[in-house]
Amino acid sequence: MAYGAGAIPAGCGGRVNGTARLTAAQALVRWMTAQHVEIDGVATRYFAGVWAIFGHGNVAALGEALAGVRETLPTYRAHSEQGMAHAAIAFAKAHRRDRAMACTSSIGPGATNMVTAAALAHVNRLPVLFLPSDVFASRRPDPVLQQVEAFADATVSANDCFRPVSRLFDRIVRPEQLIDALPRAMAVLTDPAACGPVTVCLCQDVQAEAFDYPLSFFRERMWRRRRPEPDRDELARLVAAVQGAKRPLIVAGGGVLYARAEATLAALATATGIPVAETQAGKGALVWKHPQSLGGIGVTGTAAANAAAAAADVIVAVGTRLQDFTTGSRTLFAADAVLFQVNVALHDVARHDAEPVLGDADVTLRALVDALKGWQVPDAWHAAVGSARAAWDDAWRATTTPDGAIPSDGQVVGAIWRQATTNTVVVCAAGGLPGDLHKLWRVLRPGGYHAEYGYSCMGYEIAGALGVAMALPVRDVIATVGDGSYLMLNSELATAVMLGVKLTVVLVDNRGFGCIERLACASGSEGLGNLLPDAAPRIDFVAHARSLGAVAEAVDDIAALEAALARARSARSVTVIVVKTDPARATAAGGHWWDVAIPSVSSRPGVVAARGTYERIVPRVTS
């Protein structure tokens, strides 16, 4: 077995006698460097680094400890705590959850700035280790600078905000507690079902306290991917249902990619002819050229995928929690369709009253390949799916082709895609762009689509692209971001420049929050300030990006955008390309209804009309 960079060529698992007197902070980072994973037969350290913004709560003890291991556990300095946590989460997602990073902040605002990112990781089931500093365990100098006091509970600190958004929460009030706390944290980070953010709060006095740690605690440890097999009876029911189906459909979620099951999924679709639709997290599980690929499903789905979902009699959801955008707020699937949920997580496996199949996605799909050998979908279903796919191809070309008017988001997506290669990874998050990308982006290679749409968090795009580029340094990373999201969190542009990380940012300027403006108008309401008024200052995004160290330019049309993208591909630094779009233009092709509650009482005629439409649809959901 070969060892990757940073991993030492010693056997993992051997016990060592004796002790080492270390501070809690020194013991923490020494333990982190000893945790390994195996990826494609190569062992490497699980923790790829620590993002840090230092303050009085972590600079003296944890900072000193990190300085001592910088060759094996690099420390990266960011410009915002939320941004650095987004980068760490994106790094883990790009690595299919096989590797992760840690984030440390000082007590108080540094810690609470990471809570939004912790929620993002929690929703998306992605591993990240949060190490926020905490108050003094001794309480000797209380209240300390930045301490949040709960009058009714003296044990509460600002870090308790992490409790609902952490898979595991712990607070270290004695140095020896690390001996039990850290292996438990690692077990959660590497578990396919429990995977998510872990928060280990470090009281700032305890960080500096010493303990005689057993040397066996720091032994080289190998953590391997767990692949639970499905129950025999549950699998048999799934096989029988598929074999008896006239119109089966697979819905591929992020669990397919995290299980690295894309090749198995492609083999199953090829052998049986079962069409495949994809969630935001699962997009790219099947490359777009595959004959059974129908693209995105749901509110932001393709017409082909949604037509198949509405007609399907057996639906096999693999590695997805089927959130409302995927199911069109539970209106997309036929009422008499039989739904199976294949999932490694017990929490998700029975959602929507589905038939559960608890197991690893790759193991289960392999079992289906074997069990369905020689079976294929009926000719009528195969023909219907092919016709729907061909019709969507026509709609895709019409939507992505420039027409001489102010560009739409869909036309921008088309331009980026025409300049993409199999090496491209496109990154998106909140707003209108993920909707158009889910519909219109054609994945050329698994892993080429990176969306944060579980939490739909504005500000993820640039920091996330930085994390992806650090995880996949040989890939061409393109972040797509709206001007509203850019203004929320752009400081990690400077971090990318500082670290010498290459990435391209396409900044779509529609003068505000265009996506929500369209939603407000569709709901019969007024814009409510979603778009900037004409009197508001014109922001010079090119000058701003250049001030952060990026190469930047503005383009006037789609042809100029494509030329700029070609230049950016050969650049060696961070490039920002600004293109203005029409906030009123939306992609009409594809899509599905989404449950956005309309006021039942209003004096506005537009709202009354929208409520009438809403009431005609909602009874179908609840009946």
Image: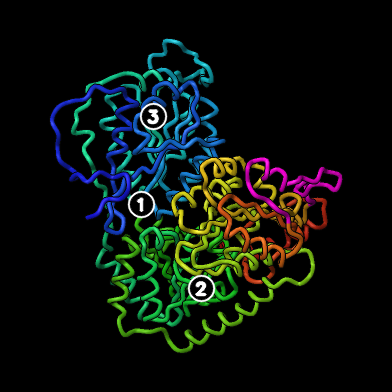
Q: Please name the residue that numbered disc 3 is placed on.
A: 67
Left or right: 148 in relation to 194? right
Helix, strand, or loop for circle 2?
loop
Whether residues under marks 1 and 2 lie with C-beta atoms below 8 angstroms apart, the answer is no
| On screen, residue 156 above or below 368 | above
**Of the residues under marks 3 and 1, which one precedes in the sequence?**
3
Q: Is residue 617 left or right of residue 191?
A: right
Mark 3: which secondary structure?
helix
Left or right of 110: which side holds 483?
Answer: right
Q: Nearer the viewer, residue 552 or 255?
A: 552
Earlier residue among tags 1 and 2 = 1
Toward the top, the furthest residue is 140
Q: Residue furthest right?
A: 535
Q: In this picture, which residue range is highlighted in magenta?
A: 526-554
Q: Mark 2 = which residue?
A: 288
Give the CA distance from mark 3 to mark 2: 46 Å
**Which numbered tag is attached to residue 98?**
1
Q: Earlier in the sequence, mark 3 or mark 2?
A: 3
